Each structure stands twice: as structure tokens, then as C-alpha cells.
Amino acid sequence: MAISHVFDTYAKTAQGRIMHFDVVMDEQDAAKALIYAKAWLHSIGAHDALVTQENCLFCHSAEAPPELRQQIDNQGYGIYKLEGCPR
């Protein structure tokens, strides 16, 4: 199995809500992780959420679980929701 790289990410909405999630991808590329974080936020309708490179940092590398592996294979990245994210 491929090793994936996890970027610990925090975003803040205009209403002050904090969303904590991991961006998981096969490349260890912080700039690309930030792009993917913003794309995911846009896809869930959080157009006003602010995420910066300082809030999207490499955390560790590991084998992605099957549900994340499928997301990575389909769109180039996976999102592991932690706190404050919509279900």
C-alpha cells in the first residue's frame, strides 16, 4: 500500500466557527494541501472560511484507510473530518 501524507488543517468561518480536519494526499506538498483544503471548504459551501498555510501543516505519514484511499484515488486528496466539520 502507498504511504500518504497528512496535513493537520484548521479553518475559521466568518461566523467564528472553527473546522479542524486533515488533508490526506500521496504527495508531501504543503502548497497543494492548502489548495485541496480550500477546494474542500468550497465544496461544502464554506465559501467564507479562511485557511492559510500556517493553519495547514504537515503532521505525519501513514497508510490511508480504505475510505480515504478511495477519495485520494478519485480526486487526488482525502479529507478526514475532526472537529466542527459538517457530517
Image (cartoon, helix red, strand yellow):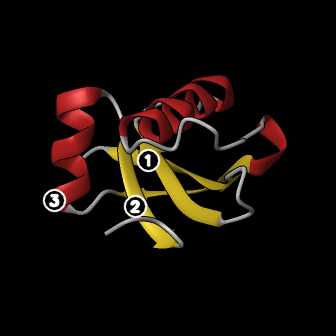
Which residue is labeled 2 in the image?
Answer: 80
Would you identify the image quadrant in which residue 74 lies? Answer: top left
As drawn, which residue projects farthest toward the right?
A: 54
Q: Earlier in the sequence, mark 2 or mark 1?
A: 1
User: Mark 1 packing: few (<14 Cα in 10 Å), some, or many (20+)?
Assistant: many
The residue sitting at 19% across, 33% down in the picture is 73
Say which amino acid is labelled 2: Tyr
Q: Is residue 53 above or below residue 70?
A: above
Image location of residue 72, percent across then percent down: 27, 38
Drawn side of residue 44 relative to residue 30, left or right: left
Give the tally of numbered discs.
Answer: 3
Give the alpha-carbon distance from disc 3 to disc 2, as whole Å: 12 Å
Q: Nearer the viewer, residue 58 or 49?
A: 49
Q: Amino acid at mark 3?
A: Pro
Give yes or no for contact between labels 2 and 1 (Cβ–Cβ under 8 Å).
yes
Q: Secondary structure at mark 1?
A: strand
Task: Return the residue nearer the eye: 7 or 3.
Answer: 7
Left or right, 73 with reference to 9: left
Residue that label 3 marks: 66
Q: Residue at x 77, y 37 (%)?
A: 52
* Image point (55%, 33%), residue name: 38
**In the image, residue 2 lies at what x, y percent?**
29, 44
- The quarter holding residue 43 reads top left
In this view, the mark in front (2 or 1):
2
**Up/down of 68 relative to 65, above or below:** above
Element under disc 2: strand
Residue at figure coordinates x 70%, y 59% from the top left: 15
Q: Is residue 13 left or right of residue 79?
A: right
Report the disc number at residue 47.
none
Callout 3: SS: helix
Can you identify the residue that label 1 sits on?
24
